[in-house]
Image (spheres, grey):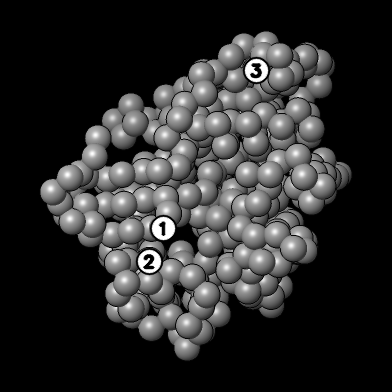
Amino acid sequence: MDSTTAEVAYYFAPFLRVYTDGLVERLLGTDVVPPAMNSETGVSTKDVVIAPETGVSARLFKPNSVNPEKRLPLLVYFHGGGFSLCSPYCSIYHNYLTSLVLEADIIAVSVAYRLAPENPVPAAYEDSWAALQWVVSHCNGQGSEPWLKDHADFQRVFLAGDSAGGNISHNLAVQAGVEGLGGVKLQGICVVHPYFGRKSEDDVGKVDDNASGGRPDVRPGVDNRWLYVCPTTSGFNDPRYNPAADERLWRLGCSKVLVCVAEKDALRERGWFYYETLGKSGWSGEVEIMETEGEGHVFHLFKPSCERAVTLMKRIVSFINHE
């Protein structure tokens, strides 16, 4: 549906337009790939509703052939899209998770959280935490989902995500470290081209300054995009946006972290800053960083067969499967 009379109130170029009459026009990630059992890709998929009251759901991925005597690592994935685009069901993320599951030989749960602006942050965090709790409720053969009960190894649970999904993965790992996960310990998280706040309030940054109809930042050092999806934010010192402002950072609830950045990504410096900040936080785990030369933000989703995307995939697979 097009808006022909209303003006554009917010423009997240070139993917999202919101009009003054309330219409939200998404230009990326709106297609839906149906789930399929025993797909020719080598991976079976199914969809589950996790919280009917909020609509939180997920797509599950499982290799077609699973040894019943062998339990597989479990990955919980959070898609990117600036908290406002895409889903596990669109071709971008369905295809990526299919490839990752096949390459790594894992079980994956790709979470569909509610999107802004219809559901502003913190809805994405709340939904993702509810989904993670649902996943770990299957520990010790409990829960209702057989793919998790019968095939997932709850001693090898990982979180991962790209862009905003990397931000969500980090924040859930902090929450898990503070509140616990019913006895399940996260082994690691992988944040790919993560979306965090700037290094300092004086950092003008390379993106987002004009993401809201050409208006300048209304708060120093804070992206208009973050202000739009999270109107209740405290700004630069919001720990969800700026991990360096989080006094709980040292309690990150996993033993290892892989940070992936890209040379031509405008968020590159923020990924490096996260890596450096985590390393100095007092957290007892190990943090690694991988930089891909000559590529931009989430290039691997749009050029999955290129050599650098294959290299990135292999690094993530190694991170998950390394004992």
In the displayed structure image, the side of residue 65 where residue 108 appears, left or right: left
Q: In the image, residue 120 lies at what x, y percent? A: 31, 53
The residue at the point 55 percent across, 55 percent down is: 163
Between discs 3 and 1, the one toward the N terminus = 1
Q: In the image, residue 284 lies at what x, y percent? A: 73, 66
> Of circles 3 and 2, which is in front?
2
**Nearer to the camera, 100 or 157:** 100
**Nearer to the camera, 107 or 254:** 107
Q: CA distance from mark 3 to mark 1?
A: 35 Å
One can see residue 72 in this view: no
Q: CA distance from mark 3 to mark 2?
A: 39 Å
One can see residue 37 in this view: yes
**Nearer to the camera, 292 or 276:** 292
Say few, some or many: other residues with alpha carbon within 10 Å of mark 1 (under 14 / 14 to 19 / 20 or more): few
Q: Are marks 1 and 2 in contact (CB under 8 Å)?
A: yes
Q: In the image, residue 224 lies at what x, y percent? A: 36, 69
Q: Which residue is mark 2?
A: 211
- Residue type, mark 3 in image: Ser
State which quadrant residue 264 falls in: bottom right
Q: CA distance from mark 1 to mark 2?
A: 7 Å
The residue at the point 41 percent across, 58 percent down is: 13
Is residue 77 placed above or below 146 in the rendered structure? below
- Residue type, mark 1 in image: Ala
Between discs 1 and 2, the one toward the N terminus = 1
Secondary structure at badge 1 equals loop
Between discs 3 and 2, the one toward the N terminus = 3
- Residue type, mark 2 in image: Ala
Q: Which residue is mark 3?
A: 44
The quadrant of the image that shows the C terminus is top right
Labelled disc at residue 13? 1
Is residue 29 placed above or below 10 in the rendered structure? above
